[in-house]
Image (cartoon, rainbow, N blue to C red):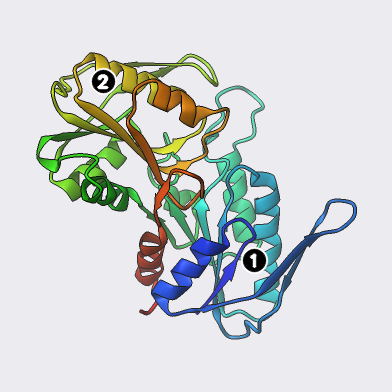
Amino acid sequence: MIIVPGSSNGPLAYRVAKLTGARLAKVEYRRFPDGEKYVRVLDDVGGEDAVFLQSAALSPDEYLVETFLASDALKDLGARSVTVVLSYFPYARQDERFKPGEAVSLVTVSKLLRSAGADRLVTVDVHRHRVLDMSKLVGIPYVDASAMPLLARYAADAGLVDPGRTVVVGPDAEAEQWAELAARELGAEHAALVKTRLGDREVKVSVTRGVDVRGRDVLLVDDIISTGGTIREASKLLAGLGARRIVVGVTHALLVENALEKILEDGVEEVFSSDTVPNQTTRVSAAPAIAGALRSLGLAGG
């Protein structure tokens, strides 16, 4: 197996290669004068199981085009198979047609990945609402790895929460799956709030069933923080319910529009994230989760 890094997150590709004992390929990326992307794989991949690793966050159009070019090139260069690892999978929010004429971007990106030569797909805590079984949509062998257990373990080991008095909370129904994974790692309780979306940037968070956080530590978890609106509303609600301490663990910390500063100003003690989107909150690597996913697909040793 050979790990082929995209231009978005070389350190994560290096960590996965180290954990799996795979070679790390050299790749040249640059732009032509007209802005088009140039991709050149500098290592021989003939007969290899090639794993192309990309984090398509913040510049999704650029990184997706790069992924399509690299996947097709790897196949054309004789790779035995091509596995695409999108540690951040873009365009997953639009998973159905809400208004007439809308493009269903999740379906479109999945089709393009297959047509560009991907034989397998690995994601990390992919953002999904109504699509519960992504494997049917993707149409190729697929694993969605999770960084949530790693984030939960960090919170405990760093002393941010006391597992014996912690409630893990998801800010909406979709996030309950992440809360359950984190709570299982800590041996803690978990719960979920209810989110009503009022627009692209405005949400309302409420409680519809018992969430007892009075005098307890709260680990608030989600797959993505973008503008931080959901997390901010959830943290204010939990503080009002008497939480002793609130910390936030998130897989993909996009943190646009000064989201981190706003969240901390609202009383959250710390925000920590994985390296799928490297930034100042990164404390945990998703590499072990990705390596485990590759092993489950029959690819990785080590």
State the separation of the CA atoms marked 1 and 2: 45 Å
Identify the residue under disc 2: 238
Q: Residue 223 carries which label?
A: none
Between 23 and 137, the one lying in front of the other is 23
Check disc 2 and report its element: helix, strand or loop.
helix
Residue farthest toward the left in the current orientation of the protein: 164
Would residue 248 appear left or right of 242 to someone viewing this image? right
Identify the residue under disc 1: 71
Residue 109 shows in this picture: yes
Which quarter of the rendering shows the C terminus?
bottom left
Quadrant assignment, res 214 = top left
Q: Name the residue located 89 percent from the left edge and 51 percent from the top edge.
A: 34
Q: Are marks 1 and 2 in contact (CB under 8 Å)?
A: no
What percent of the width, then of the height, locates residue 301? 37, 79
Q: Name the residue located 44 percent from the left edge and 74 percent from the top edge.
A: 18
Residue 230 shows in this picture: no
Would residue 22 appear left or right of 236 to someone viewing this image? right
Check disc 1 and report its element: helix, strand or loop.
helix
What percent of the width, then of the height, locates residue 16? 45, 68
**Numbered disc in front, either 1 or 2:** 2
Between 117 and 229, the one lying in front of the other is 229
Q: Name the residue located 53 percent from the left edge and 20 percent from the top edge.
A: 201
Kind of residue at badge 1: Ser
